[in-house]
Amino acid sequence: MITRRQVTVAVSVALTSLMISPCGLALPRAEPSIKTVESSRPPYVARTAGDALISITLPPKLLGLDMNVENSIASETGDFKPARYSFPDTAVPQSVLHDLTRIYRYDRRRDVPIVSSGGDWVIAEYFIAGSHVPVSRFRLLGKQVQRQEQLDGSGRTIRIIAVGWARPSTAEDDGTTNMSELGQHPAWIRVFKVSPAGTKTLVALAWRRKGFATAPETYDEPDEKLLMFGLPDGTMKWRTKAEFLKAQDIDLNAAKFDAQ
């Protein structure tokens, strides 16, 4: 006679066997699929995974408290270009789609395209939960950082990191249009201190040990072994790229989320 307990055990074993692979290993749980959610009122396009919001693109005025002079870019029609929000290392519930202002409660990254024809060329800013003052700002082309701004607690730019080949004698934050005039020790990264009045002073840089035989593209990334890291007077201060980036708080991955 089969008892109720024996039936329960048999069912339990059967269910367990369905979760075990032929090799005797537990099968991994399937990740939730990413879905696109579109809305016309209010207008947005969101990407979700299960109950989580991954990103959302919307007219920036819907989250107008995050707008500032630097991140509000007008389009050819006079409207502001759409803002894309993402949430690195932050779990945001999909339920915020019912009240978009709840997005303010979470750490977030806000990207705005610089030109209509180049969606990958963006201004990216990071905001901490509950704040509308960015803690860092980047200009990127795809994943390549072209410029980083370090901000103080009020959102004022206090340092600028310019990435891209330029003459080391360049005293202001501008680029070099003629790559054939870079000189003997062209600079790859330049760090400028910005005064309250907006004056920029070169304080550190990474430069090439020798000049180029052939002019490079502005953003051709160099071999670290060909670089030196130091001060505008030519003094080498840091032995490696890692030491230089750490000392100057440079983030070439645009992943900064430093709370002030």
Image (tube, grey):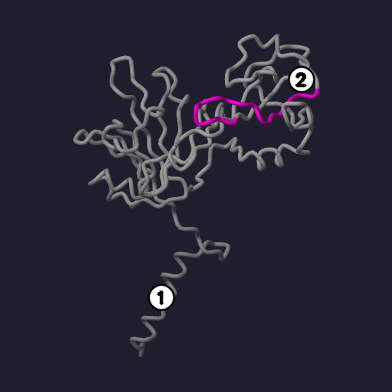
Rounded to the nearest angstrom, the CA distance separating label 2 from label 1 is: 72 Å
Farthest residue, direction front? 197
Would you say the residues marked 2 and 1 are in contact, meaning their CB atoms lie under 8 Å apart? no
Tell me the magenta residue range: 193-209
Q: Quadrant of residue 144?
A: top right
Secondary structure, magenta segment, majority class: strand
Mark 2, residue position: 185
169 and 57: which is toward the camera: 169
Q: Is residue 35 magenta?
A: no
Quadrant, the N terminus: bottom left
Residue at numbered disc 1: 12
Report the front residue among 179 and 258.
258
Of residues 110 and 11, the one drawn nearer to the viewer in this rendering: 110
Q: Is residue 109 above or below residue 71?
A: below
Give the percent coordinates (x, y) of residue 11.
Answer: 38, 75
Q: Earlier in the sequence, mark 2 or mark 1?
A: 1
Label 1: few (<14), some or many (≥20) within 10 Å?
Answer: few
Q: Amino acid at mark 1?
A: Ser
- State the mark number for residue 123: none
Query: Does dot 2 land on a helix, a strand or a loop?
Result: loop
Residue depicted at 36% across the width and 87% down the height: 2
Q: Horizontal and vertical percent for residue 80?
A: 31, 24
Instruction: Say which residue appears at 47% left-offset and 50% top-offset.
Output: 89
Numbered disc in front, either 2 or 1: 2
SS at circle 1: helix
